[in-house]
Amino acid sequence: MRLHWIIKSSSILMVAASVISVAGASAIASSVTSRALNNRDAEVTHRIECSNGSHITEMIVDEQHNYGVIDVKFNCSNGTTTLWATNNPNTDNRFTLRGNLAGLEVFEQYGYGVIDFRYFKRSGGAEEVGRFTYNPREDRTAYIECSNKAYGAEVYEQSGYGIVDVALLCLPESEVRRGTTVPTPRRP
């Protein structure tokens, strides 16, 4: 039996609005989606994020046979790259998908943790880019989405299982223009 959950950062199920402050940088108001799978067995939470108001333009996923997804990192709109979330060197396969990250469908196999992601980019609405590992053994999936673009993630790791859950860090809604009318720039 496969369970499907839909969770959006703008819904009542949103975990919290937060203020992120980095030494020497201005605070960025943002929101965090709920954990996709609500797996509470994680022993370590890793936070990886793009800097200076930039957003994710590419996601890299490492997979280890018999464990599933063991690590992730992001390339950012300002040309920087985050560190690997778990820093696990035991990869067998590496996958990359591109686009302004808006949402993830997270695939879980019981006894293994996260085994795949489906990547959605922001292009007007959320548009599917594709899956990373194409592992067909999921027992359930869950979807998390930012109403704008994502700039990072909280990655939850359990020893012996790899990544067991994820939440997205979302840029503020105010940075997105809504509606059909866009002001014409002034010309000098």
Image (tube, rainbow, N blue to C red):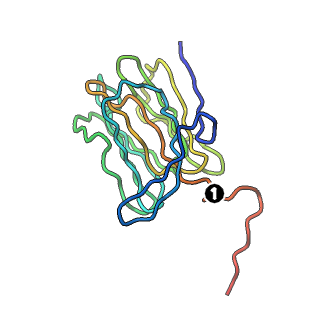
Q: In this orientation, which residue lies closer to the viewer: 32 or 162? A: 32
Report the side of 78 relative to 4 (left or right).
left
Label 1 SS: loop
For residue 113, which quarter of the picture? top left
Q: Nearer the viewer, residue 157 or 139?
A: 157
The extreme top residue here reads 1
Left/right of residue 137 with respect to residue 94 in the rendered view: right
- Residue beneath the point at 26% across and 27% down: 159
Residue 177 % position (x, y): 67, 59
Q: Quadrant of residue 103?
A: top right
Quarter of the picture holding the C terminus: bottom right
- Tell me: residue 94, above or below residue 108: below
Q: Residues within 10 Å of mark 1 (few under 14, many from 20)?
A: few
Residue located beneath label 1 in the image:
176
Q: Residue furthest left?
A: 89
Q: Is residue 24 above or below residue 126?
A: below
Please provide percent x and percent y for residue 153: 43, 44
Q: Residue at x 40, y 25 (%)?
A: 40
Q: Residue furthest bottom?
A: 188
Vertical relation: 58 (above or below) 115? below
Q: Residue furthest right?
A: 181
Q: Position of residue 55 (x, y in %)?
A: 48, 55
Q: Which residue shows up at 31% across the image and 30% down it?
A: 43
- Residue flagged by tag 1: what amino acid is it? Val
Instruction: Give x and y (percent) for residue 179.
Output: 75, 56
